[in-house]
């Protein structure tokens, strides 16, 4: 027992540290004084400082613990009288009370006094042991008696560790006196611990014969017959006989059998005690159990849950003497378990060679196979030394030799097994018996196939030494795979080299795959180097799908294999689907491969490999791997070596990958029916919503170059043409404004007389110009509609152009025929409105102003969305005011009520004239409800609308970078759409002049262009 480090090592004591140095010294002595029984010194210190008697050492023990361990009853009384009775049950760090210490030190007087003073005898320590458990375990039987005689609270059935009671602890230690005493004080024999064991199980496992006899006698006294008691079952349905066999005490086993234990009782896995004994090789125990049966055959072949007999268990661990005894008693020698394993097969599988030899010598059937179709030789060859484990006489038997060619359900022979696992000794032994090496499995694989597939180099060497021709070396399996294919696919470089040195041919399998295809499919670069060094023609060999090894490597994503093949000069070809290896890598989303190809010097060659029937790989990269295309664009930016603040510092942009491929242009020259899209890459970014690519500096610079080259000029020309129609229309509006006459409650509009011939020549010219240019505008829109089809309706500016053109024609055509109608002037007003709005939209393509036009459009769209929500509120309040405001002309009709409500929404409430005056003059029909709805209106409509608008404006103020960025992105998109239209309209030579410049150099002072080299 440990009282502390110093107590254990030198019989001195721990020191407790408190604030004052002197008190610290005194407190260090109090434990030693308590243990040695210095009552006067303890009394002196208790008078001086009573709290010393409550000190704790480093293990949490108090002076009372030490006094109890030393058997000093006077000090025990003194401490309890000073500190109080609550000190009696104080536990140290190990959960031990002073009573635990007293029992462990066999201090009877301490135990008696502690119990008399009120100590609790049923407290468990951290090891789940009570004082009674300790006394029983240490065989302090006099203390057991004290615990019961000095305290009537002592629990004889107190459960400790794993639920073990004191009786079970006594059974474990064969403490018969304690068992008898516990039984007299109420101990029960029918209590189970957490394992489901009764006391009879515990005593059986402990091998305590005397204790078992006493437990059975007590059971008889309690009315439990011995035959029932000895066959009690625990949670696993194990009897005491099962546990006694596990314990291995022969005397207890004999006692169990004598008392009527059932040998055939099966536990949950249906194992009997006989199975346990056979597993342990307990021959004497087996003999005892079998001797209790008149007919041994009733028990000798009993089966467990795995359908194994005791003989199976004996052979499992090579208990040959036990196996011999069981067979002599009538055990079935060829019975099989649930897996079809006979004792011979099981012994062969578990390397029980003595048992194997014995079973074969007594006539065990070696032709029996398990459920997988394996005979005992299949298992033998899998073990170290292989067939050498068998006696030579057995191997000379012709029937055994024939079994070397026997196949399992997969058609594999023992030789196949040995070659698969690379058991060299077994292969050597079987080849020494001159067996047929070329036998194949169900998958048409020979022994060499298995050895090559699993990389068994020594086995391959041994097999190749026995070959008389090369047929087996180049033979196919059911998939057309040769040993070289299998070795290459698994990356076994030594085997590949061995097969090549032995004359293996470079054949293709049934799908046209060569050994190089298989090697690159798994990414084994070292194997690839070996194969190419042996036959470089493999590099461009294709399979049935037209894929080269480069295609396969790109498909599966092995970067090292792709780079190696490119380095070795692999030809970049197209497969049957007209895809290059780069197409395959992109469409299988092999990002690492694509990035490696982009950085490779042969990337330009790879990107040009496509047909007119397939897409350029650039389009696929944009669609499937935008991050890789961004990496490509990053490589298109080259900064000079000058300092960034130097005037010589410049940045070079390479636009090759954004332009239509040169090869596609050549196809278009030879095939006039073929058309190519000049800005295909940029349009692909828009189509696939690749915003991060559109905003890349290279993309922006490319669009800027195109815009400067021809887009801005064409746009300015369009703007000039538009002004030729807009300015004359404006002039007509300014000079032909009608007059209005008011007569009482009626109004008449007097149109300015317009005679095409008699009017001023300038007005006539303006009418002609407006007419001609708007007819041109209509024709232009029709052409655009035919070209763009559905996409035409997605552009809001097209609607504005149509409105301006049609209303302008309605305005000027009547003038040509001297017709005067008021609707004509209404059409003119609408025409001038839409025309100037259309003119504003033309500015969205300019660099500085366009951003704000685009932002303005976004704000307008937001306002429209908000107004859609407010339509329902407008209807609600408008109809409410129409029903209540009977005195006001502004609400006399539904249309006027809605109009007035809309005006009030934007802030023009006219509170005094509409509401206050009517209320003060008692003209308001429903004042209470009207004011209530008016208050709701003010809260919901003007205030809520203004907050939404202000909130949008605040967001714009707090996030200017985001809005400007979005505006720039949209501006770029607008320019791109316009450039597409220009390319479609002018087709042409002017466009080609704009695309010839593929490199732009930019410095801090100016931009300059240079032609492609």
Image (cartoon, helix red, strand yellow):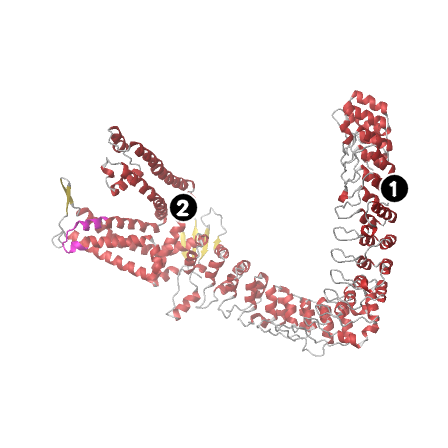
Question: What percent of the width, then of the height, locates residue 223?
Answer: 82, 46
Tell me the distance, in whole angstroms, between the alpha carbons under discs 1 and 2: 97 Å
**Residue 721 falls left or right of residue 27:** left
**Residue 723 falls left or right of residue 599:** left
Q: Decide: few, some or many residues near mark 1? Use Cα within 10 Å; few <14, some 14-19, many ≥20.
A: some
Q: Which of 633 and 393 is in front in this view?
A: 393
Question: What percent of the width, then of the height, locates residue 178?
Answer: 85, 41
Q: List the residue tagged with mark 2.
A: 964
Q: Can residue 627 be seen in this view?
A: yes
Q: List the residue tagged with mark 1.
A: 177
| Above-or-below relation of 184 to 721 | above
Circle 1 sits in a helix, a strand or a loop, which is it? helix
Camera-nearest label, 1 or 2: 1
Indicate yes or no whether the magenta region holds residue 532. no
Main secondary structure found in the magenta portion: helix
Q: State which quarter of the image contains the C terminus.
A: bottom left
Circle 2 sits in a helix, a strand or a loop, which is it? helix
Tell me which segment is drawn in magenta.
Answer: 813-829
Q: Which of 580 and 1013 is in front in this view?
A: 580
Q: Residue furthest front?
A: 223
């Amino acid at each position: 027992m440990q009282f502390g480090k110093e107590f254990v090592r030198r019989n001195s004591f721990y020191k407790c540290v408190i604030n004052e140095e002197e008190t610290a010294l005194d407190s260090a002595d109090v434990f030693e004084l308590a243990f040695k029984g210095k009552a006067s010194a303890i009394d002196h210190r208790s008078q001086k400082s009573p709290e010393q008697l409550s000190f704790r050492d480093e293990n949490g023990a108090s002076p009372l613990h030490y006094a109890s361990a030393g058997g000093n009853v006077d000090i025990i009384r003194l401490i309890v009288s000073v500190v109080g009775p609550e000190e009696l049950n104080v536990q140290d760090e190990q959960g031990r009370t002073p009573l635990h210490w007293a029992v462990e030190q066999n201090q009877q007087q301490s135990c008696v006094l502690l119990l008399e003073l009120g100590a609790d005898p049923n407290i468990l320590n951290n090891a789940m042991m009570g004082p009674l458990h300790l006394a029983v375990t240490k065989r302090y039987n006099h203390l057991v008696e004290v615990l019961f005689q000095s305290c009537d609270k002592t629990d004889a059935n107190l459960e400790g560790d794993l639920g073990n009671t004191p009786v079970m602890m006594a059974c474990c230690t064969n403490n018969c006196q304690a068992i008898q005493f516990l039984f007299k004080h109420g101990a029960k024999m029918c209590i189970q611990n957490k394992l489901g064991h009764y006391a009879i199980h515990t005593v059986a496992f402990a091998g305590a014969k005397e204790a078992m006899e006493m437990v059975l006698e007590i059971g008889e006294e309690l009315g439990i017959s011995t035959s029932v008691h000895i066959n009690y079952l625990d949670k696993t349905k194990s009897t005491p006989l099962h546990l006694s066999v596990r314990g291995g005490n022969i005397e207890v086993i004999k006692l169990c059998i004598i008392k009527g234990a059932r040998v055939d009782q099966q536990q949950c896995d249906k194992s009997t005690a006989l199975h346990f004994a056979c597993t342990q090789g307990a021959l004497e125990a087996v003999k005892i159990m079998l001797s209790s049966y008149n007919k041994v055959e009733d028990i000798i072949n009993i089966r467990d849950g795995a359908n194994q007999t005791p003989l199976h268990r004996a052979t499992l661990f090579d208990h040959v003497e036990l196996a011999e005894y069981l067979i002599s008693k009538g055990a079935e020698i060829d019975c099989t378990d649930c897996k079809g394993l006979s004792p011979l097969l099981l012994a062969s599988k578990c390397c029980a060679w003595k048992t194997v030899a014995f079973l074969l010598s007594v006539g065990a059937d070696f032709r029996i196979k398990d459920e997988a179709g394996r005979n005992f030789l299949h298992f033998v060859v899998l073990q170290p030394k292989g067939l050498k484990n068998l006696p030579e006489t057995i191997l000379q038997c012709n029937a055994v030799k024939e079994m070397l060619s026997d196949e399992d359900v997969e058609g594999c022979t023992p030789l196949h097994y040995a070659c698969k696992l690379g058991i060299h000794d077994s292969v050597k032994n079987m080849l020494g018996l001159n067996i047929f090496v070329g036998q194949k499995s169900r998958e048409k694989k020979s022994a060499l196939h298995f050895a090559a597939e699993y990389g068994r180099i020594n086995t391959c060497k041994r097999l190749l030494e026995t070959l008389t021709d090369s047929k087996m070396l180049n033979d196919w399996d059911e998939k057309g795979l040769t040993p070289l294919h299998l070795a290459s696919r698994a990356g076994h470089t030594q085997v590949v080299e061995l097969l090549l040195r032995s004359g293996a041919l470079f054949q293709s399998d049934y799908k046209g795959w060569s050994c190089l295809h298989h090697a690159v499919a798994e990414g084994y670069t070292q194997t690839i180097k070996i194969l190419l060094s042996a036959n470089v023609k493999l590099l461009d060999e294709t399979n049935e799908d037209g894929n080269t090894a480069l295609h396969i490597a790109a498909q599966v994503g092995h970067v090292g294999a792709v780079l190696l093949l490119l380095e070795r000069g692999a030809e970049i070809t197209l497969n049957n689907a007209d895809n290059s290896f780069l197409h395959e890598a992109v469409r299988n989303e092999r990002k690492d491969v694509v990035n490696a190809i982009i950085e490779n010097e042969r990337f330009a060659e790879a990107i040009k490999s496509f047909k007119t029937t397939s897409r350029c790989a650039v389009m696929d990269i944009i669609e499937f791997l935008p991050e890789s295309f961004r990496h490509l664009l990053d490589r298109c930016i080259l900064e000079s070596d000058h300092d960034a603040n130097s005037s010589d510092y410049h940045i070079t942009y390479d636009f090759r990958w954004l332009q239509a491929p040169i090869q596609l242009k050549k196809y278009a020259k030879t095939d006039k029916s073929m058309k190519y899209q000049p800005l295909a890459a940029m349009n692909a970014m828009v189509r696939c919503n690749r915003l991060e690519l559109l905003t890349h500096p290279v993309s922006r610079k490319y669009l800027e170059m195109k815009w400067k080259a021809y887009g801005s000029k064409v746009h300015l020309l369009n703007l000039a043409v538009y002004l030729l129609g807009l300015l004359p229309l404006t002039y007509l509006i300014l000079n032909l404004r009608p007059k209005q006459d008011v007569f009482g409650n009626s109004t008449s509009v007097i149109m300015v007389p317009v005679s095409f011939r008699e009017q001023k020549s300038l007005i006539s010219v303006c009418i002609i110009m407006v007419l001609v240019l708007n007819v041109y505008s209509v024709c232009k829109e029709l052409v655009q509609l035919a070209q763009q089809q559905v996409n035409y309706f997605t552009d809001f500016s097209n609607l504005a152009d149509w409105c301006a053109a049609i209303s302008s024609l309605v305005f000027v055509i009547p003038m040509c025929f001297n017709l005067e109608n008021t609707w004509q002037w209404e059409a003119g007003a609408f025409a001038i409105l839409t025309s100037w709005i259309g003119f504003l939209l033309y500015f969205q393509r300019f660099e500085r102003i366009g951003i704000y036009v685009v932002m303005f459009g976004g704000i307008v769209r937001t306002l429209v969305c908000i107004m859609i929500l407010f339509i329902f509120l407008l209807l609600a309040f408008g109809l409410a005011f129409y029903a209540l405001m009977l005195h006001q002309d502004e609400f006399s009709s539904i249309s006027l009520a809605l109009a007035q409500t809309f005006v009030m929404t934007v802030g023009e409430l006219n509170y005094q004239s509409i509401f206050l005056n009517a209320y003060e003059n008692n003209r308001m029909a429903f004042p209470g409800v009207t004011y209530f709805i008016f208050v709701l209106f003010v809260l919901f409509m003007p205030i809520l609308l203004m907050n939404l608008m202000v909130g949008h404006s605040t967001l714009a103020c707090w996030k200017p970078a985001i809005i400007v960025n979005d505006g720039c992105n949209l501006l770029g998109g607008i320019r791109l759409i316009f450039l597409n239209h220009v390319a479609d309209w002018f087709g042409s030579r002017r466009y080609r002049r704009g695309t010839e410049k593929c490199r732009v150099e930019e410095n801090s002072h100016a931009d300059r262009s240079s032609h492609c080299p």
